[in-house]
Image (cartoon, grey):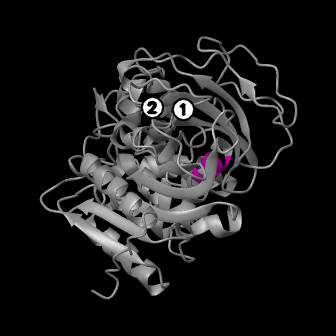
Amino acid sequence: MMPILHRARLLSAAALLATTVWATVGPTPAAGSPRPATVPPTGPASGAVQAFTVDQPGFYEAPNPLPDVPHGTLLRYQPYRQTALTLGGNYMRIMYTSQTATGQPVAVTGVAVLGPINGEFPGAREPEQPAGGWGVLTLGHGSVGMSMFCAPSLSLPDDGGRAFELSDVDRVVRDGQWVVVASDFEGLGTPGTGHPYLVGQSAGRNMLDAALAIGQFPGITISKTTAAVGYSQGGGAALWAGELAAAYAPELQMVATVAGAPATEVGALAGAGFHDRERSPLTLSILAGFATAYPQAAGALGSVLTKSGRTMVDVINQHCFADEVAAPRPPYLRADPAASEPFAGLFAENTPGQARQSSPVLIVQGDADENVPVDQTATLAARLCALGDTVERRMLPGMNHELAASVAMRDAVEWIEAIRSGTAPVNTCSG
């Protein structure tokens, strides 16, 4: 057996297991991760924030019904037990309200890395609060999987394997400029909703609502200054956050958006699996995500999937991308979803570049990236430039999708800090 996708942090579809034997493999949480408790919590009253203790069960069970509050409302938080990984700041699980792609309310979880709370900080050197409050760096994670157990917040405070981006950016807290808030994205962490993979209209809202919610955290002053950062799946989500911000969260002051190897050209990514069987796991994951987000997509799966494809979508929905599973015999696709409705139209609706960004944009990627083809990011950049956005496209020589991840996050932090300090952004649109 082999992983569904090659690595949990990648968008690779090269490691499809095309075995001839189908075996039922149940979903399992990451080793050492706290399993979402099934103890039903008492739902918070409207406007109340629940403070969970470190070992209190039931955190991931969303209140039912959800309180009638605006999107971006902080519902609860829970400190992590301190480990070496969490010494970069006050690490907290959070739950907040957001909206689905179709505008329905939903509870979403995530991780926040905060500066001193009521003067308390776990590190040896306590950073000083910036004048006017901490800025918010809202972070979008890379591809991890479809099961609720794949949530990055569940992989902490253990090995943090599904939250690797946090270790690349949490120094901004120690340096005393920003807090970091990283959405798990809809359906990861909270049971029962499903994960709308690569549905940017959902992920962008999740990132913005995380930024709104963390501003309500008690004991720390947080400003409206906001930057969106992400890699791979999260890179596309960051661009959607920047595109939606003016209308969806106008109270946020967006100053910068960084898209690392962004998975934005959804139609092209989905269509590739029809023409190249080795890339079909990614296509199936996209179809599973869109079926979660849109009833019309769920109803049309049979028009593009074979019987084996339907079975494979079911198993993908129950697993993380690094999980080893046995698979039914291909083929999985009977038609190209990128050329079939309603999928083609829904893919287009979730491709960023339909309205101007709220801030300057940095697109950074390895020039040897085979997972998110560089010609696709060139298409993205051209589309943003045509709208009048300020865009810098930066290529990392000789780096593939995996190797470029940490370098891209380092460049992101440096670029954002420079923008906030007044450095004029580079615009390569006319270059």
Picture disc at residue 56:
none
In-front residue for pair 83/102:
83
Magenta region includes residue 281: no
Image marks 1 and 2: residues in contact by CB distance under 8 Å: yes
Residue 180: percent from left, percent from top: 50, 43
Q: Secondary structure at mark 1?
A: loop
Residue density around tag 2, few if under 14, some if 14–19, many if 20 or more, within 10 Å: some
Residue at image x 24%, y 46%? 402
Q: Secondary structure at mark 2?
A: loop
Q: Amino acid at mark 2?
A: Glu
Magenta region includes residue 208: yes
Distance from label 1 to label 2 (Cα)? 7 Å
Residue at image x 57%, y 47%? 196
User: Which is the main secondary structure of the residues drawn in magenta?
Assistant: helix
User: Compared to 123, does 164 lie above or below?
Assistant: below
Residue at image x 40%, y 16%? 31
User: Compared to 177, does 123 lie above or below?
Assistant: above
Residue at image x 61%, y 49%? 211
- Horizontal placement of 220 versus 35: left or right? right
The quarter in which the N terminus is drawn is: top left
Q: Amino acid at mark 1?
A: Pro
Picture disc at residue 116:
1
Picture disc at residue 126:
2
Q: Residue furthest left?
A: 398
Residue 275: percent from left, percent from top: 31, 61
Residue density around tag 1, few if under 14, some if 14–19, many if 20 or more, within 10 Å: many
Q: Which residues are magenta?
A: 207-212
